[in-house]
Structure formats: structure tokens, C-alpha cells
Amino acid sequence: MTKLVTDIICPFCGTLCDDIEVEVSDDGKQILKVMNACAIGAEKFLHAQSPDRIVRPRMKQEDGSWKEVTYDEAAQYTAKILCDAKKPLMYGWSSTSCEAQATGHMIAELVGGIVDNTATVCHGPSLIAVHDVGIPSCTLGEVKNRADRVIFWGCNPAHAHPRHMSRYSIFSRGFFTTKGSKSRKVIVVDPRPTDTASVADYHVQVEQGRDYELLDAMRVALQEGPLPETVAGVPKEKIYELARLLKSGRFVTIFFGMGVTHSLGKNHNIDIAIALTSDLNKYTKAAIIPMRGHYNVTGSGQVLGWQFGFPFCVDLSRGFARYNPGESSANDLLMRGEVDASFVIGSDPGSHFPFKSVKKIHDLPSVCIDPHMTPTVAVSKCHVPVALVGIEIGGSCYRMDNVPIESRKVVDPPAGMLTDGEFLELVLAEVKRIKGVAA
Amino acid sequence: MTEILIKNGFVFDPVQGINGDKKDIAIKDGVIVESVSSAAKVIDASGMTVMAGGVDIHSHVAGAKVNVGRNFRPEDKLQAVYEPARGVRHMAGGNSVPTVFKTAYKYADMGYTTVMEAAMPPLYARHTHEEMRDTPIIDQAALPLFGNNWFILEYLKNGEMDNATAYISWLLRSTKGYGIKCVNPGGTEAWAWGLNCMTINDPVPYFEITPKEIVAGLIAANEALHLPHSLHLHGNNLGNPGNYQTTLDTLKIAEGFKPNNTFGRDQVLHHTHIQFHSYGGTTWADFESKGAEVMDYINKNPQLTCDIGFVTLDETTTMTGDGPFEYHLTALNHLKWANTDVEVECGSGIVPYVYSKDIYVCGVQWSIGLEMALLAKDHMRCYLTTDHPNAGPFTRYPRVMKWLMSEKARDEVFASMKSEDKVRDRSTLGGIDRELTLYEIAMMTRAGTAKALGFGGKLGGLVPGMQADVAVYPYNPETESDPEQIEWAFSNAKYLIKSGEVIINDSEIVSNGNKQTYWVDVKTKASTQVEHDLSEMFRKYYTVSERNYEVEEKSFMKNPNVIAIDATL
Amino acid sequence: MNTVTITITKQPELFIEAECFTPDAIAGKTAEQIAELPVHIGRTTEKVGDYFTVEGNAGETAADTKLVVAGDLTRVKYIGSKMSAGEVVINGDADMYVGAWMTGGKITANGSIGHFAATSMAGGEIVVNGNAGNYLAASYRGDWRGMSGGKITVNGNVGSDCGTFMLGGEIIVGGNIDVHVMTHADGGRIVILGNAKSRLGGQASRGEMYVFGTVDVMMPGYAYARDEELEVCGTKAVFAVYHGDLGERHPTRKGETVYAKLYLKK
């Protein structure tokens, strides 16, 4: 007999679907089937079953080979490199629970670390924009129940957040949007003809890297002000038409992604998109929501916020918290040579950072806490495999609209394997021992 | 557990009518007792003031919008020294929106031991609890928002009181909430369409119920449920010139209701930050105080309590479940604006604000709060808050005490204003020479607030049997004459004991304590209608599943302290 | 005026945070005392003397003190930050936060300076004979109160995000400037003698920008108003005046809407 487990939270992307159903073996050890999830989410659950999973910590030897060590030995190494360092970088945090993050931050406080999360290469510019102009936003259910104008700007949920459109933003039927996609006008702004654009009512092919100019023009067009003939490759008539289309809606929502957060202008693109959203509230109701990537990158920003007051790039080295992306951001620190140890958890900078940063991780004392073999593991001195949050251990996570959801445990981790929370507790205890702090 | 004897202090305890008498306070096993053995730890409180631990009835210290306030204001961290870790203390920073650690340390330094988080969006309840769990020392609870909730709007419109109470009971249990909070009834739902309800008779779009009906229905439901606290209301039309009429209309809704509880609570309606609701005039140009009119009504109506929301003339961060108000504010001051509308339930907004003593409107706002508190006839029903951080950070409570207790201190502020004459002209504050006593301050900050929250037999006093929350302030009421010493002493408790444990010893925080989180579990008759409605609402209109909604005590609460009520009896 | 010369003798493995490299912090101190002042490297606190030689005693007050910092300072932050008076001369390239939160006095950088120089500067003068990095004279993250006074002259090039949330004061750029100039400004003046790229005055409500060279891409929110003949930095010329950012909220004065102005030399 197999068992069906329902209401499972998918630990893949910021959409944080919580309606996953998983069929598990009678002994509760084996995931047999995953239902309701997108292809990527399903693969995340099934991959946990992979027979070649690494189940014990390993230290890299001089000849480049790995030698298995105990969790205690790995915790001792981790604590030692963090305590020996003058300014250790503690990066990642986005694919783990808020509870593990909180424990990690207590380690960072003791060792004077810099805590940065994957927003640094994702929606960090959005966070900076929010510092400058705020953010009128809403939960995804408001989009589902009310939105009749939906813009996807520089994002492609069809590929990156596959269930977003059906659960929340295009096809979903809500209280005041009973006709689903027929209740909405959907606009995609993207230089490329994406799969999301193919289901939209309007596709605006903005010139690559000129989103700021187009958004500025949209703000002028809302006021029916003068515009040049074309802006960012878009004729002014089209811009006025779009502005009127938005003003005629009852509830406008703008979703945006990496296409604007990491093209020319970065935070400024978001800043002005937020300003456009605020402006729209003079005429109708409007909200803007970032398409956050990792399933709990939002949670990392939340925990850092309530503990230290900043959402990422938190520098604790001087014994108090400081913040300035551009200085205290992981890539700037690595590339400028400002840090002397690397601790990575719940992310893969080896895949996402520039070569110069990855080379630096390779050159530093380094530990990588990750369930899988990743490019980051490959350049690290110590690899600590841990149970998968959301599959083998539960914990608090935050969706892209900041809604907190408690992820669930579905199956046991491989025998003897620790969770990241448990491993961090070992490291914390060892750091306290080294520092002579009462437990 | 250890025994403690606090000797020779000047004790102020309105619960027992003790007004500055020299008296010893004995503590054993976490509670106040008549006497202790000679083995007790002795705290010499000679020449010092002793009170029960402070109880804050309304403060925004934990949850989604508080954290937006933190995260969207990095510059707020530059406004105060970011304190390094020390002993048991974590790093602690932020000014108007402090981190959870700083929140705890600053409340402890002020001798406060219990803080009510004033607005918990139900869908974000887990977040509120995570922050409260990580806030050391102080006991906390949170009030979930009901005044714009679709279930409530429907049930009250249809007169289905049993369904309303069954739903409230379900929501309190699901969110681990403490009582019924209502912010801008109907107005925040209207704001989901960019609209508002400015009077108590403006119908809510689509739902076609009025704020008046919502407030009356929630008072009735609150009493039917026998909850420890009354309805906790932030009325319509906050912050606008001329709004005092809306406020009086709102307060009148409570006439005829009787409290129905076993917690010693006498009010049926608590109106919060009443200062923001007592404005006369028609525009900011002829803006003036109507604090006297509003306080006169409250004085005459024992079914009401209020807290003030004193404007402290600081740079701060406003945050409220009153979404349309924050949009209105950003249109006035042009500073950054965050807003979150929450599906099915509520909304909120956040805008930084600089209350400058050189801007006459701010000066008048400052006057109104003090005027109202000084015109109050019963400080067991009128409380000290700053609606933290809306009218100012809670860290300014001791400064507010100084203003309340010293006409000289008030005159100094008046004299420092650019438009002193104009400010004096717009309220009656300048003509009031009343100076509150420490006894009255103790009512406003612990005895009265504890009673109104339904903690009357447990907190807010020093009666044997009560929880041993005791603050000792380095302030000699017999000899001290400098008002500045009030502000200093009440910011720097010499000793603080919470649940019998020493938190502050000789002015230094020595323990993170053993914080508790209160919530209310009220049993009602089962309602199949509510069960059906819940199932449908989650299936169709929420974006989380019903099973993933409830906040688990074990993961999200430190020392949960459940108050069980059977409302079926 | 007394002169103190601090010369770097040893490069740190990481970076040195030297908030004490200001006339205010060293005023009234002897060379020996200055060598004992703390500098920070990561979580460690070390002494000025561990990495630098100090010659000369400071004056009694900041105003009486001239501080010369010399050598390869590319790993030294905060030179001249928060200074209120006196003089700082930087002989070499310096890292971040030169003159940040400065309220008075003068800094002369005879090399290039790093990012975040003159953050929220309120007064005083900075002259840079090399280049300046990104975020020159920008506000601190989230603060709507950027540079409010003082004067900055950069004879080389300037990076991106110069003058964000600027309220007052003046910046003269001898060379070229990168993207995002005077974003969100509500006052102040920037003169660019070289070329600009794009996004000048985005979301600005007030403030003036003068460009002598070229602009790659104009902001659509700026509309041509008229030509004006002006003398700017000693050059008399005709400028095309643009008003903007038309998408932004603008104050009115005497019934007239006030705009940010972009002057392009013809």
C-alpha cells in the first residue's frame, strides 16, 4: 500500500506552491510519484531519491580527491575557518528554512561574518529600489481575485515560475475575476518573443537595456505629457495606448524579473517601475510584485530584517550591523579580496557568480553545505551534504509576496544524515567553545 | 526557584491603592508573595521607585509590515548608535523600527514586561509569531485584524452572529491571536479598489455593509465570546482635519453594550491612538484640536477605554493596517510608500514621517495628545502609547512621562517651536497646569492597560499571587525636582524582574528571560456553515490551502500561554 | 596650520577601515598618539602605526590641522569621512568613502578615489585630480536626503549613480560620466565638461545638469524648452534647455511649475 500525502509545499521557486501531492511508499521512505507540481518541482522531489546521493561530509585532500569525515569533524573545520578569519563571507541561505537561517546568523554574529543571500545576484536591485521609493504591493491572492491588467516585465514565468500563471496571474479565476484569463488584459514587455509573450494580449518588444527609458515614458504618458516619436524602439502611440489601457483597469499588477533587475540600470529600472505603479494609484489601483527566484530567498531577507534590520549584504564584522550593497555584497567582496573565508549554504555561486569570484572561493578556506554535488562543492575544501528542506525536513519559508508558509517533511533523509539546522547547531556550539562564550 | 526581596522602595501600585509608600515586595516561584525566607536575594531599592512591569496595550513591534519598515529604511539604522553585542545581548540597531533584539532591550530598560502587538494580518500570522518568538525577554500577544475580513463582512451583513463568533474563534485558534482588532472598518477593503470609507455610514464597495454595522457587530461578537480584551478599534477617517465627528459617532456605537467576561475587564470598546482621531478644522490651514470634546465624551462613558498615541516630535516610520491613510500620507510628504493588500482579509501601508516641531501641524498634534491625557478624569481608562512607531518610537515613553508630569517641560517644548503662538492657539494645552503623578502614570502604563487587556488579576500590579513582573527605577519621588530625571530614570530601570527572574541587575541586562506568548482559545458551538465557507474560500479565493494556514504552536511560539474560554456556556 | 603626514608602509591582506583619518579625529594629538589610534581590518582592531608611519603633530583643532595621507591607499577606506574642518591631502589612489558625510574642510585627492565618496555630503570641498568611482555624492541607501551642500571637482571621469537624491551643492566633472546622474534630485547642480551616457536626471524634480560634450541617449521625460546663452565654468556658450523629468511630481513656485533642467551645450 502506498500513502498519499497532500498539501505539500514545493521547495523550488518563489511561487511556493502548497498544493503538491506526493505518493510515498508504505514505509514512508520512498517518494513514488509527485502530483500537481511543475516539471522542475517534481524533479526536485524525485531527485532526492537518487541512489548516488552523497550522504556524509567530505574534505578535499591535497591531491584533489575527497575523504569522508564525520559531521563533528566537518563542524570543527567550519567553526575553525570562521573563527580564524577576520572577515568571513557567509553566503547563500535561499534554499533553506528560516530556522536554519536564524541559527546561521547567530554564528555570523559571533565570528563577525558577512551574511549575504542570493538576492545579490537576483532581486537585490529590487530591494535597493524599495529602499529608495517603497513598494505598493499585494498578496498573490489579490491578483487572482481582482487583477484585470497584468504586466510581466522582463520575466518569463512560463519557464521560470511555471505554475504562476495558472495559480495566480493569468488563468486563475478569482472572486471578481470569474472568467479567468478573459477577465484580464495581459501585457508582456520583453525584448524576446517568449512563451509567456505568446499567451499575452500585448507583447511590447522593448529595445534591450532601455527599460528605464520606456518606464519613464510610460510615466509621462500617464499624464498625457509630450514624448519623442519612439522610445526604446516603441512608437509613442503605442506607449500612450498602453498607459490608457492600464488606467482603464480596476486593478493593475506588474510582475518583474531578472530581465530588468540585471540589465543596464539594475535597481533604477525597478525604482521607476515602482514609481509607475505608485502613479497608477492616482487613477486606479495598482501593485507590483518581484518574481523572486529561490523558494526561500524572501525568507532570508525577512529573518535578516528582524534580526539586524537589513535584507541582504549584512556586514557584522565590526561587531554591529552595516549595510551597503556595492561594498558588502558577495561578489564585490570576493572580487575585491575583502574576505578571507567562504561559507556557502543553500545556493550555488559556483554556477551563478563570475569566474573571478568563483576562483576566489577556490583560493580561500571554504565550506559548502549542500545536499548535492554542485560546481560550488567542486571548488570548496569541505562539503557537508544535508537533508533537503521541504522534503526531508520542514521549516518556515516565505513566498515571493512575503506570505509565510511552513514547509513539510515528506520522507526521512538517508540514515545518519543531518539537516542543515542540526549541522549549524553543531558549528554554533563549536564556535562558542572556541570563543569562550557560554553555551 | 529563587526568592527575591525588593526592599525599601517607594511603591506605586494603583491596583492596591499604594501611592508611593515605602514597602517591600517579595517574590517567590515567579509570583508576588507576602513574604520570603531570609535566603532571598535582596535588592536595595532605597530612594527608588518600584512599580509592576509595564504593560503596553498597543505597539507595532513584530510582523510583516514592521519588517517592511525595517528593511525599506536602511537609513533608519544610522539614526541611532547600532549597539554591539555584549554579554547576553545581541547586536541591537534601528531607531524608529528597531530589530527584535533592540525592541526587547529597550522595553526592558523602560521597565516594560508585556507588549501587545497591535495588528496581525491573519495570512501573515506566522511571520508575526516568528518575530515574537525571536524577541527575547518581553511577554507578547498579537491582535489579528477583522474589520475588513470577507467572512466577517458577509456574516455581519446577514446578521449571522453565531457564524461570526464561530469564525472569530476559528481565526484566533488558527493564527494564535489574542483578540479582535479592527482597523478602518470597511475602508481597507474599499482601498483594494483605491477607495475608502470616510464616515461610519459609507457603505463598503460590493459588500454593502457600513463601518457602523461592522463595529457594532464586532463588539457584540466580542462579548458573546467573553474575550479577555474588548474590541480594539482604529476608527475611520484617521489623521484628517475635522475627523473628531467621525470619532464621536464611532464611540457612540458602544453605547448600550455591556462587558461580558470573567477577566475583570469593564470596557466594551478600546479606541486606540485617539489623538489621531480628535482633529477639528476643515483643512490643514484651520486645523485645531478637538481633544477636549472627545475626551469629555470618553470621561462620561465608562464602557470606553483609549490610548493616546502621543506625537513625540521625532523622525519615525508610520505603519498601519489603514492602507488608504498611508497613500494619503505619501501624497502629503512625498516620501517612499510601501503597501500590501492581503487577500480576503486586510491590508497595510508604511511611510516614513518627520514630525518637526517647526511645522505647526506637528506641534498641534503634539499638543492634542498631551491635552487629552491631562483632561482625562480616569487614567485607568486612558493609556500611554505612541502607537509605536506611528506617532513616535516607543523609546520616547519616558519623555512623554516627563511632559505629562511637568508643565515646565511642556513649556520648554512650546518655547522651542517656530510657530509657538499658533500652536498654543490651536489647543487648550497651554492653559492646563495639571501635572500627572507617578500614581497616575502607573495607571496609564500598567494597572489600567493590564485591566483593559483582561490581564487584571495577573499583571499590572504587585498583589500577592500576581506574576512577579517588577521594575525598579532610579528615581526618588520625594527629592527629585528636575523633570529631565524623569525621562532618564524611566529609560534606565535599575532592576527588572520578569516572572520572578532577574532581567536587569544594576542597570545591566543579564538575562534574555523566558518570554511567553499569550493566545486565546475560545470554544463556540460548531457551525457547519462556517466549515463550508472556509473550505470554499480556501479552495477558490485564497492562495494557500486550508491545511497550510494554521500557525503551529510548537514551531512558532516560545512558551505559548493559552487562555481557554468556553463560550458555549 | 600643522601638517601630519601618514604614509602607508605595509599593505593589509584585507582592507583597512580608517575612520580616524580626519583632521577631527587627530586634532590635538602628537604623531605618537596618532600612531596609537585604532584602525579596523575585518573584526580585528589594529593600530595606525601597524600599517603607517606618522610624522608631525596635529594642530589644536581640526581647522588647524592638515592631514597628508600618502602611498598606495587602494585598500584604505573612509579617508576624510565625516570631517568638519581642516584639510586632507591624499597622495595616491584611495578606496571607498572618501569625504563621506563630510560637513566642512577640504580634501584634495591627487589620485583617484573609490566608490561612495562624498556620500550625503553637507559642506566643504573635494578636489579629485584623478577619477571618482560610482555613487559619488549619492545619498546613503534609502535616504531621501543626499548631498546638500559643498563643492566637488573631479578632473577625471566619474562613475555611475552620481548625485542620487541630491538636494544642493555643486559637482564639476572634468571628464566623462557614467549612467544615472542626479537620479531623484531635488536640487543641486552638476556640470559635465566631457560626455555623458544616458539617464540624466531620471525621476528628478529639481536640480540642474550642464553637459558640454555628448549624451548617448536622452531621457524621454525631458522636453526641449528653449535656448539660453550662459556662462558656465568660465565658458560662454548657447545651451539647449530641457525640462524634466516630466513623469515625476514637481513643486510649484509662484504659480509656476519648477522642473529639473538639463542644459546641453550647442
Image (tube, coloured by chain):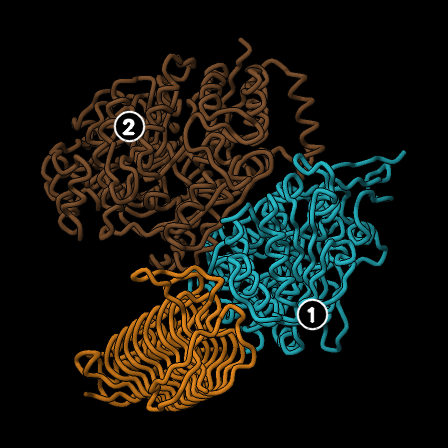
Letter of the chain that mark 1 sits on in the rendering: A
Letter of the chain that mark 2 sits on in the rendering: B
Chain identity for the colour brown used in the image = B
How many discs appear?
Answer: 2
The spot of residue A311 in percent (x, y) is 52, 57
Residue lying furthest right in this view? A1
Q: Colour of chain A?
A: cyan
Q: Determine whether label 1 and label 2 are within 8 Å by CB.
A: no
Residue at the spot 72% in from the left edge and 60% down from the top edge: A203
Q: Name the amino acid, label 2.
A: Cys
Q: Residue B93 is drawn in which quadrant?
A: bottom left
Residue lying furthest front in this view? C226
Q: Is residue C60 above or below residue B488?
A: below
**What residue is pinned by disc 2?**
B382
Q: Could you tell me how far apart the alpha carbons at marks 1 and 2 are, in whole angstroms? A: 60 Å
Q: Nearer the viewer, residue B372 or A180?
A: A180
Q: Is residue B461 visible?
A: no
Q: Colour of chain C?
A: orange
Q: Residues within 10 Å of mark 1 (few under 14, many from 20)?
A: many
The spot of residue B561 in percent (x, y) is 49, 28
Q: Is residue B242 above or below residue B215?
A: below
Left of A39 or right of it: where is B387?
A: left
The spot of residue A236 in percent (x, y) is 61, 66
The numbered mark at residue A350 is: 1
Q: Could you tell me which secondary element the residue under label 2 belongs to? A: strand
Q: Residue B478 is drawn in which quadrant?
A: top left
Residue at the spot 37% in from the left edge and 80% down from the top edge: C171
Q: Name the amino acid, label 1.
A: Gly
